[in-house]
Image (cartoon, grey):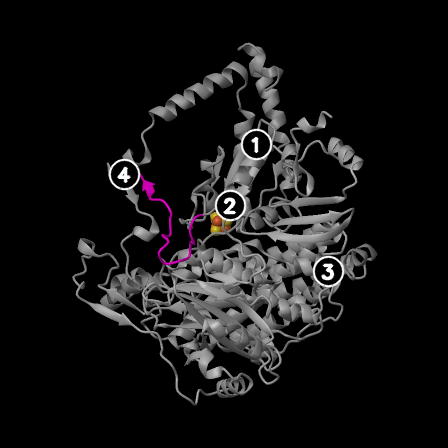
Amino acid sequence: MSEDKGSFGVHGTGDTSGYSGLVRAQVTPGSSERPFGGYFDEVADDLERAFPAFSEAIEKIVVDRGELTLFVKRSHLVETALALRNTETLRFEMCMGVNGVHYPEDAGRELHAVYALLSLTHNRRIRIEVAVPDSDPHLPSLVEVWGGINWHERESYDMFGIIFDGHPGLTRILMPDDWQGHPQRKDYPLGGIPIEYKGATIPAPSERRSYQ
Amino acid sequence: MGLEEKLPSGIVLTSVEKLAGYMRKSSLWPATFGLACCAIEMMAAGAGRYDLARFGMEVFRASPRQADLMIVAGRVSNKMAPVLRQIYDQMAAPKWVIAMGACASSGGMFNNYAIVQGVDHIVPVDIYLPGCPPRPEMLMDAILKLHENIGDAKLGVNRERIIRETEAAALAAKPTLEIKGLLA
Amino acid sequence: MTIHSDPYAESRETTEGRVYSVTGGDWDSLATEIGATKEERVVVNMGPQHPSTHGVLRIILELEGETVTEVRCGIGYLHTGIEKNTEYRSWTQGVTFVTRMDYLAPIFNETAYCLAVEKLLGITDDVPERASVIRVLMMELNRISSHMVALGTGALELGALSPMIFAFRDRELVLDLFEQICGLRMNMAYIRPGGVAQDIPAGAIGKIRETVDQLRINFKDNEKLLVGNTIWMKRTQNIGYLDLAGCTTLGITGPVLRSTGLPWDLRKTQPYCGYENYDFDVITTDSADVYGRFLIRMQELEQSLRIVEQACDKLEKLEGQPVMVADKKIAWPSQLSVGADGMGNSLAHIREIMGESMESLIHHFKLVTEGFRVPAGQVYVAVESPRGETGVHLVSDGGTRPYRVHFREPSFNNLQSTSAMCEGSMIADVIGAIASIDPVMGGVDR
Ligand code: SF4
């Protein structure tokens, strides 16, 4: 996922710790094998049964820390969502929202959209994750499937620049309409100003030397 | 402002100053400008236990045109900044501003892309009230300090002289960075 | 006509006809002119600075006479960038940021965040029982103080001033408890990954019990004022209707969902912090209107008091047990406590790190400056806040700082239902409907 170099995040001469040689690779949990445990097997089976293009649509299934994540290809997102919502044994009738995550190191899959689903009927939770490249950040909108995702999609657009095709009004929601850029991406600086004290300044938080 | 500004310097002006100051400070009407967490403490200050009514201030005016004190309670985002300025402009002079809480005074802990780093970038501030959030007692203390200030406010030529003096002092003042403080 | 030069009401021709932009001031001249035209469509902008919009919410209403034909919310006036700011701080410091999101329910934000960090660390089961009980105690007290503001301001916005005075009186009692327990009235940053910042001080239990009794008596005042009050019922019954289907489509949780009759409460359905060990009822009504939501909040107060009492009993039994995980990689070397002046570290802590143990000093230094590392991965944790499901989506890349923190705020989500609740109703009812959602703009905009 990413690499940490040294004890401090600063490169060059900023690091006084003497540990700059230390390189730590960070990996996210990979694809899981069956059995997944809990109700996850049931969910996967039911979805496979209800949804013919299952093997094509699902890139991988990750079970980590007691949570199930389905990585879905964006071309099949809407059908997967419909199957998850409509199949009687699945019935994920609520979508708790979508959230963007930006992984600049994950070439070709920089922007992830993460949907949290909840089934009131069966009292279950799962997560769908879709990855899109930064150069083509398009996803089908799920407003038609779960109406409540409307504002969440607008927020992900506002903060990450993910474009949800078919959204009824994809405009900025939190930032002013004329704002430049998408502030919560990793390549967008935190901003802020240096703080002046008597006889000293401290740089803005994102430019301070700090541990990482 | 009004007729009082035209008075010549002297005993009449000082008496008018005292009278006007007394009247202004005793009927300060705050505009509701609750933004974030601090606003809840501002509401608490107006409610039963702390009871701002004791100082003739319980009438929080919703319309800026009827208010002469703006308590900026909370963090001001870049999106809110123009609105804040417009409301300030709509208030009738003389008017005062209290920056309530760390966020309104300096941006507080949110030194980032979204928050204005202190409302003094947008409107002139009379009192900076620290705290996150300041307790209602602190808000009351700030208000009382402001009352004192208003009570002593100068008018007419005296006012102009004071403005000129403070501006000259501000121009001559060292920037914070060059003040050595305890480091000297 | 000379009206065109009216500084307060500019007008211009558009493809949809003449549009007036009124900024306040001279409404008379405008009313006269509009009265002369045949068009009835008026777009009114309420907020972002308006006394009855619950903070800096902006509502754009399209009216036909008194009837609302379209409502849109404008939000973002309090966007603070908290989620991004957290990425530049250690995991523990994150608590201080998230507590300021939904500022009426700080303990819920903290708990949700800490539960998520603990899940990422895989130490959910290691959190001491006493810490969990304290969390429950604080959450329920917080639910009371939050509902008090909801009831008070809700009533205030509909024109009833007295309930607000009573509500804030009762809220102050709860805030006194907060102050005694963690030193602050709001934004406490009291719940920490692994437990809580410090044990509750001696004598707090007794004070809580006293307050609970007092609150039971005090709640009657508001009940007498509002429940069954004709004016109040007229303003709230059959207003802001949203049925179960609407709620599920829009992802609505909390009192709004429970007012449709569905007993969905995460404390019962997906318990956390040991809620399965407490005896309480999930309150529902089936009227699906503002009055129903109001009743739910009123009765949840009593349920919260019940839980608080049970938590007190448990705490008495767990006296002297730790309130932080034993793992020295996460917990500070010794317990903190509030000094006589309401702040600062305990003498025991200072003695330990400064005088007795070099390792403690190193540990303390590392934990405070660098913080602990959290294994890579992502989790979603939800708790039942006073407004509904507060969910935290937390991503770690294995570092000492969060990679991404996202809050699924119930206020943000529930506010979407404004259009569904208000379109077709009278303009005066919009205020009641929004007050019944009880959005907190700090949570909506973050
Ligand atoms: S100063 Fe603190 S309490 Fe006040 S608005 Fe800012 S964060 Fe909230």
Give the residues drawn in magenta, as a range. A180-198
* Cα distance between the residues tagged 3 and 1: 36 Å
Residue A18 screen position, x and y as percent: 16, 61
* Cα distance between the residues tagged 3 and 2: 29 Å
Would you place residue B77 above or below residue C176 in this image?
above
As helix, strand or loop, the secondary structure at mark 2 comes to loop
Q: Amino acid at mark 4?
A: Gly
Which quarter of the figure is the N terminus of chain C placed in?
top right
Residue C129 screen position, x and y as percent: 47, 77
Residue C142 screen position, x and y as percent: 57, 63
Q: Amino acid at mark 3?
A: Gly
Report crowding for label 1: few under 14, some 14 to 19, many 20 or more residues within 10 A (C-alpha).
some
Q: Which mark is residue B122?
A: none
* Label 1: chain letter: B
Overall secondary structure of the magenta section:
loop
Q: Which of the marked residues, 2 or 1, is nearer the chain's N terminus? A: 2
Task: Write down the residue under mark 4.
Answer: A199
**Which of the pair A45/B85 is nearer the observer?**
A45
Q: Residue at x 23, y 66 (%)?
A: C358
Q: Is residue C205 visible?
A: no
Q: Does ligand 1 reach within 8 Å of label 2's beta carbon?
A: no
Q: Residue at x 30, y 46 (%)?
A: A202
Q: Which mark is residue B79?
A: 2
